Amino acid sequence: IDIVWSLVRRFDEPQKYKPFISECTLRGDLKVGTLREVNVKTGLPATTSTERLELLDDEQRVLGVKIVGGDHRLRNYSSVITVHPETIDGRPGTLLVETFTV
């Protein structure tokens, strides 16, 4: 769970776990309210996205992001990712849940 959370919490490097993102530039420090500019790989319905960090809780392992601009048609889009311990086939594992509002 710690390894997965260490990747997911990186608002400044979403391309580490989202293969459709080619590049990300952070505007400011890594804290709630910070904006990032994301370049999306060809083939998806957008090429750029401006996103704001809405929530970052390391204790509860929760990351919240809202799209505030870009060249796509998504309106009022937000996403919340939570990371949880999970037992898989009797072994410790990790469950990642991402919910979307559009």
Image (cartoon, helix red, strand yellow):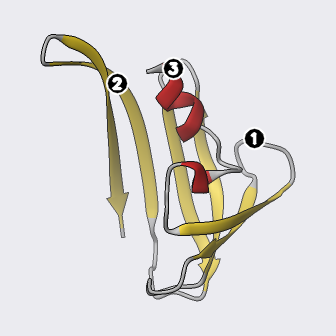
- Name the residue type under label 3: Asp
Which residue is identified by label 3?
2
Residue lying farthest to the left in this orientation: 89
Q: Earlier in the sequence, mark 2 or mark 3?
A: 3
Q: Tell me if residue 10 comes above or below residue 4 in the rendering.
A: below
| Label 1, label 3: how far apart the Cα atoms are | 20 Å
Residue positioned 75% across, 53% down in the render: 34
Q: Which mark is residue 31?
A: 1
Q: Which mark is residue 84?
A: 2
Q: Disc 1, disc 3: CB below 8 Å? A: no
Q: Earlier in the sequence, mark 2 or mark 1?
A: 1
Task: Give the mark toward the camera: 1 or 3.
Answer: 3
- Name the residue type under label 1: Lys
Q: Tell me if residue 28 comes above or below residue 72 in the rendering.
A: above
Pick whichever, 13 or 75, lies toward us: 13
Q: Position of residue 56 (x, y in %)?
A: 60, 36
Horizontal relation, residue 96 to residue 48: left or right: left
Q: Earlier in the sequence, mark 1 or mark 3?
A: 3
Q: Position of residue 64 (x, y in %)?
A: 52, 47
Within 10 Å of disc 3 (Cα), the crowding (few <14, some 14-19, many 20+) is few
Quadrant where the C terminus is found in the figure: bottom left
Pick whichever, 6 or 35, lies toward us: 6
Dot 2 lies on which element? strand
Horizontal relation, residue 61 to residue 30: left or right: left
Within 10 Å of disc 1 (Cα), the crowding (few <14, some 14-19, many 20+) is few
